[in-house]
Amino acid sequence: MLKDFVKNPKPEKEELGARLREEREKLNGYQMRIKEAKLPVMVLFEGWGSAGKGSVIGKVIKNIDPRFFQVATMDAEPTPEEKRFPFLYRYLVELPEAGKFKFFDTCWMEEITDGVCRKKLSPEEYEQKVDSINTIERQLCDNGYLIMKFFFHISKKEQKKRLQALADDENTKWRVSEEDWWENKHYDDCMDVYERYLKDTNRTAAPWYIIDASDKKWAELQVLTFLNQGIDTALKNHSLAMPIRQNIFQLKKRPLLAEIPLDKTVTDEEYKKELKELQAQLRQLHNELYRKKIPVIIAYEGWDAAGKGGNIKRIAEALDPRGYIVNPIASPEPHEKARFYLWRFWNRLPKTGHIAIFDRTWYGRVMVERLESFCSENDWQRAYNEMNEFEKELTDWGAVVIKFWVHIDKDTQLARFTDRQNTPEKQWKITDEDWRNREKWDVYESAINEMIQKTSTAYAPWYILESVDKKYARLKALKIVIREIKKACDAKKTK
């Protein structure tokens, strides 16, 4: 793309000025349409050092109400704290809200290309990160985001000239780093790396636009023209349904809920003895997974009154409180609703060596959001594959992902609802919504069966906890958590 880039002829000064005024006015007019359509816009600026990215960002944002945009400046090297999260984490927490712009002064490209140029990334790591980027960009576009990607291109000679001019000025020499000089010295090698990355991440949904950055005003005009064209197309396509992607992951067959016997029980004596032993094992494993920097994600879904809270409590009791968090997931807040639906779960991921327990999860998309029409059919149909991809990203990062469905029958739920309603200290646990959901038991069961069959992957399978006897379900959950963490800790020894 860079090597065969053909520059368009730069307009004469008068024409350039006229076209700039026209494109600036267009962008100014588009901002209200973007707000009304709730279109989130991500604009990624990449390119050679001193190619003028910051200058053009400054010019572009002058045409937008400051309430409708933010600028994020990302360093090529993540901080030690950021390294304890998945590669994409620090970028995805910066996602714009619906109806707003987010301009990125470099984004995920620089971290990868810098890693390759400096030989900090292996070929396998490069491929994995590129796959992650292509997947998340496609997910974002499918979920209504406009992603515009610009690469600012200048020659080696032009870059050296600009770097020298900055370095010679007392007031600007701080802007020239050793990395900039290194890039110019190794221009041809860097060109090869950038060329490969641009080709590997050039997709129909989020293509690359190469900007001739030899002149600042000309670069601004190119950016504005492409940006306005992208916005116009996105506004026209915004209400269209996206394709449903075919699942590419190996699935583990699971029985239908109606086929699962719910007669499993333990005695009080067995429960007390095993609970103490299992919690002691988990307590010890928590120390080991912290030492080995293994993140753990435990996801709970289940029927109302199935016993999720008590189950979570018995796991949490065994953990060091400094090393875990329980995330109770309710309806999304307005600022969460205004972003990609997985954004609020990316924000709640654990650091390496820590455990995140989710009381309700991203699977609300294909249950309550589906059945209560809080999202379109196209949204929830796409979500099965998106959630499989999300969990694959987590397991590729090194996380242990454990998913529980806490299962009871309809009669047990009724008995527990009635007990809650008739016991003053338990009445806070029962709501009118619980009774309404109970009336939809059959349609929920059908949706849950579909969810389990379509998202029980080899790397993140579903485990059913038979919870008519809550004590049995608690012990089973502890055994599964211990087994999976132990497996991950043992595997880490061989690396």
Image: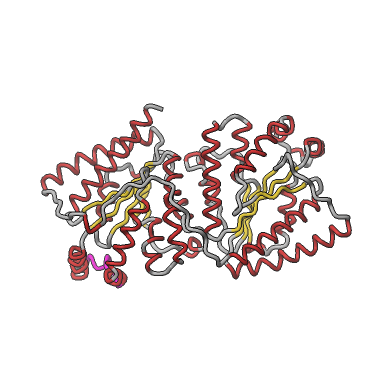
Which residue occupies 33% across, 49% down?
403
In this picture, is 84 found above or below 95? Answer: above
In the image, residue 230 lies at what x, y percent?
Answer: 66, 59
Q: Is residue 146 left or right of residue 185?
A: left
Quarter of the rendering occupied by the N terminus: top right
Residue 417 at x, y percent in the picture: 22, 67
Which region is colored magenta? Answer: 425-432
In the image, 317 versus 28, the foreground residue is 28
Tell which of 216 and 139 is nearer to you: 139
What's the residue at 44%, 62% (across, down)? 332
Q: Is residue 340 visible?
A: yes
Is 256 one of the magenta-colored residues?
no
- Residue 435, given in percent of the width and then of the height, sits at 27, 71
Res. 169 in view: no
Front-most of 294 and 41? 41
Q: Residue at x 46, y 62 (%)?
A: 379
- Find the residue positioned furthest to the top: 494
Instruction: Give the image's coloring scheme.
Output: secondary structure
Is 246 above or below relative to 4?
A: below
User: Left or right: 378 with respect to 330?
Assistant: right
Magenta region's main secondary structure?
A: helix
* Residue 100 horizontal/vertical position (percent): 60, 62
The picture quadrant where one finds residue 443 is bottom left
